[in-house]
DNA sequence: CGAAAACTGAACCATATGGTTCAGTATCTA
DNA sequence: TAGATACTGAACCATATGGTTCAGTTTTCG
């Protein structure tokens, strides 16, 4: 069974709960960027953006590296895995419960078989 | 392309960023519960737990119904769908980028294979 | 060298969050 | 009807969050 490191899920989901930070992740999905570039894109001071990047970094969602004056931000190596795993595990229980309530027992049965529970 | 209702993702991820609330969701995954029961389980005042339930309800993750004195909480009908969809979409970009970069991706791939559990 | 660019850190501010207590209200139940 | 149970709401508190400004520091470049 997967063990969820509680505190990391905290910071991971908290990082994702801000629209600006999700925007930064999308931005970095298409290309790496400096703090300055991100700050301009999101109409924010350098300092403000640096804080957001700090939060994302803390959550393992991005990594940064400074070369000369410029700190370059890129997507982290596996940041979303844990959060995705937690959500997927919950979703199985979720859907099983609603299938049962709807009277559509097929999915539930299948879940139970796989689950070994 | 999927359009993500920004403000709902905000409240959804924010709701998930607290360990107590994730615990409540797990609890409700096995059975419905009253505010009192949840408060006892998580060693918290009624008022405190009611706030947490309020946050989860706002996020669409639980629904509640009051019968007599007792408010019963249960899992909401589709609360995690949007968050899960956002994460999955990001993960594809994520993984594509790391596939291109090579490196740490092996472990990540293995995770994905096991994911079908 | 000297000035501009890019970041960093401290300090500040308003608001939100996670929790409490206390004082209700509504609903059982004896 | 009286008292216990279950919740509700207001008020409060400490800390966190999202943002700012301002005053640096380090690099780059003419």
Image: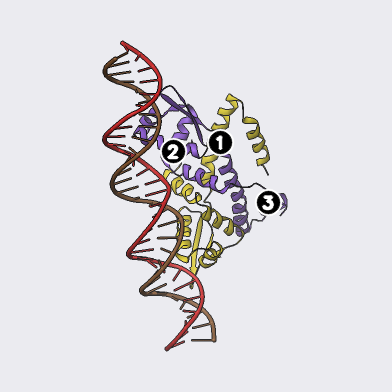
Chain colours: A purple, B yellow, C brown, D red
Residue A21 - label: 2
Q: Secondary structure at mark 1?
A: helix
Number of other residues with Cα within 10 Å of mark 2, as a class: few under 14, some 14 to 19, many 20 or more = some
Which numbered disc, 1 or 2, marks the residue closer to the eye? 2
> Is A113 in front, or is B27?
B27
Q: Are marks 2 and 3 on the same chain?
A: yes
| Whole-percent x, y for residue B49 in the image | 48, 62
Instruction: Tell me the subunit letter for badge 1.
Output: B
Residue A111 - label: 3
Q: Are marks 1 and 2 in contact (CB under 8 Å)?
A: no
| Whole-percent x, y for residue B76 in the image | 52, 56
Q: Are marks 3 and 1 on the same chain?
A: no
Residue B91 - label: 1
| Whole-percent x, y for residue B92 in the image | 56, 34
The CA span between labels 3 and 1 is: 24 Å
Sequence-first disc among 2 and 3: 2
Q: Are marks 3 and 1 in contact (CB under 8 Å)?
A: no
Q: Above or below — where is A20 with respect to C26?
A: above
């Amino acid at each position: 069974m997967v063990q969820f490191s509680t505190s990391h899920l905290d910071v991971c989901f908290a990082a994702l709960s801000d629209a600006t930070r999700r925007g930064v992740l999308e931005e970095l999905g298409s290309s790496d960027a400096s703090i300055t570039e991100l700050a301009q894109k999101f109409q924010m001071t350098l300092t403000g953006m640096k804080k957001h990047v700090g939060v994302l970094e803390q959550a393992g969602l991005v990594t940064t590296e400074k070369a000369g004056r410029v700190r370059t931000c890129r997507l982290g190596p596996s940041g979303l895995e844990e959060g995705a795993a937690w959500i997927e595990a919950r979703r199985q229980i979720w859907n099983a419960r609603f299938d049962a309530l709807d009277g559509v027992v097929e999915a539930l049965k299948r879940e139970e078989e796989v689950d070994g529970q």
